[in-house]
């Protein structure tokens, strides 16, 4: 269950919390965008610079704070606070495998999930019934996948430009063959190159973008399923339903009834 999340900035002020003496319990994930904070456990302390986060279960013997005597340091971070037994196996796996402080790319899905939601809610969006729990599960599963994947080298310009194109044009009808031809490559070579650098095929990446947008439309609009399919770049409603069911285990209509409130 999602309790709250947000983005905050701390500078030249007292900001110091002991997690064994809090007025709430649950899990806290706090990710640094810029500046630095400090996270302490019985094993020692870690500076939290950009791209690092601590993951804590409250109550526990740990502490996080803005370092004193550093007036130029402005700690900007994202925090996510949630509860529930479903989070326990994810927390244990992450803490046992990676420790209390982890490094996560700013452009990775688990971070972008909250940034996009924060922007949407700033513009007036409200969470639907049960959506918070769904968001927490997606966050934890994607965080674990991100941490378990080996760090990949920088993308070549071809793949980077292709990803940018897919993000900007996924609602349009185009094939991977057409995208490869646009880059002057054969479909087979482009697919091998993209998969080697990103860990997933271009078809899977493009489908993921379209499904992510479809989830948002199903939860936040009353658009018919056929219209959602067209708006997300799928050729027809029937094909969209097949892809959606294969990815989520239910039909778009069932997903809307279950989580749309």
Image (cartoon, grey):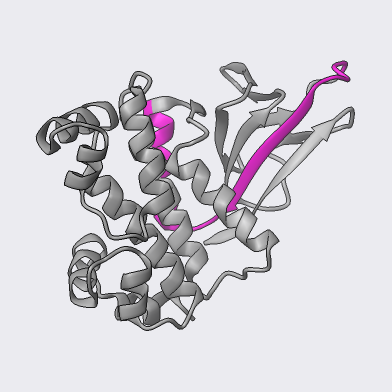
Q: Can you give x and y, in whole percent of width and height, for residue 155 in the image?
A: 35, 24
Q: Please tell me in which quadrant of the rendered image residue 77 appears.
A: top right
Q: How many marks?
A: 0
Q: Is residue 141 above or below residue 231?
A: above
Q: Can you give x and y, in whole percent of width and height, for residue 81 in the image?
A: 60, 51
Give whichever of 215, 102 is nearer the camera.
Answer: 215
Q: Please tell me in which quadrant of the rendered image residue 242 appears.
A: bottom left
Q: Is residue 48 left or right of residue 133?
A: right
- Does the rendering let one see residue 59? yes
The stretch in magenta equals 69-97
Q: Residue furthest left?
A: 188
Q: Please tell me in which quadrant of the rendered image residue 79 appears.
A: top right
Residue 104 located within the stretch drawn in magenta: no
* Residue at 62% across, 70% down: 126
Q: Is residue 242 left or right of residue 253?
A: left
Q: Is residue 223 above or below residue 31?
A: below
Q: Is residue 73 left or right of residue 186?
A: right
Give whichever of 231, 116 is nearer the camera.
Answer: 231
Give whichever of 110, 227 is nearer the camera.
Answer: 227
Give whichever of 170, 216 is nearer the camera.
Answer: 170
Residue 89 located within the stretch drawn in magenta: yes
* Residue at 31% across, 63% down: 233
* Residue at 89% across, 27% down: 12
Q: Can you give x and y, in whole percent of width and height, for residue 87 in the image?
A: 43, 51
Q: Can you give x and y, in whole percent of width and height, for residue 96 in the image?
A: 39, 30
Q: Is residue 185 above or below residue 220?
A: above
- Does the rendering let one see residue 19? no
* Residue at 46% across, 73% down: 219
């Amino acid at each position: 269950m999602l309790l709250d999340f947000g983005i905050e900035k701390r500078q030249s002020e007292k900001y110091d919390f002991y997690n064994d003496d809090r007025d709430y319990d649950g899990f806290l994930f706090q990710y640094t965008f810029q500046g630095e904070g400090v996270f302490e456990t019985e094993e020692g302390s870690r500076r939290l610079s950009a791209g690092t986060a601590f993951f804590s279960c409250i109550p526990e013997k740990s502490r996080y704070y803005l370092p004193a005597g550093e007036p130029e340091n402005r700690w900007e971070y994202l925090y996510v606070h949630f509860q529930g037994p479903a989070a326990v196996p994810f927390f244990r796996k992450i803490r046992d495998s990676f420790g209390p402080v982890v490094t996560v790319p700013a452009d990775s899905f688990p971070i972008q999930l909250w940034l996009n939601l924060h922007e949407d809610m700033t513009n007036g969006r409200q969470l639907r019934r049960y959506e918070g729990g769904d968001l927490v599960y997606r966050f934890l599963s994607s965080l674990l996948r991100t941490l378990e994947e080996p760090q990949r080298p920088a993308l070549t310009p071809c793949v980077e430009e292709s990803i940018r194109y897919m993000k900007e044009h996924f609602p349009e009808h185009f094939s991977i063959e057409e995208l490869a031809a646009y880059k002057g490559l054969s479909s087979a070579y482009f697919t091998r190159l993209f998969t080697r650098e990103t860990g997933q095929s271009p078809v899977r990446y493009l489908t993921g973008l379209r499904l992510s947008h479809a989830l948002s439309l199903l939860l936040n609009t009353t658009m018919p399923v056929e219209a959602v399919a067209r708006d997300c770049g799928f050729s027809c409603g029937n094909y969209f339903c097949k892809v959606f069911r294969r990815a989520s285990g239910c039909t778009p209509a069932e997903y809307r009834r279950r989580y749309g409130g």
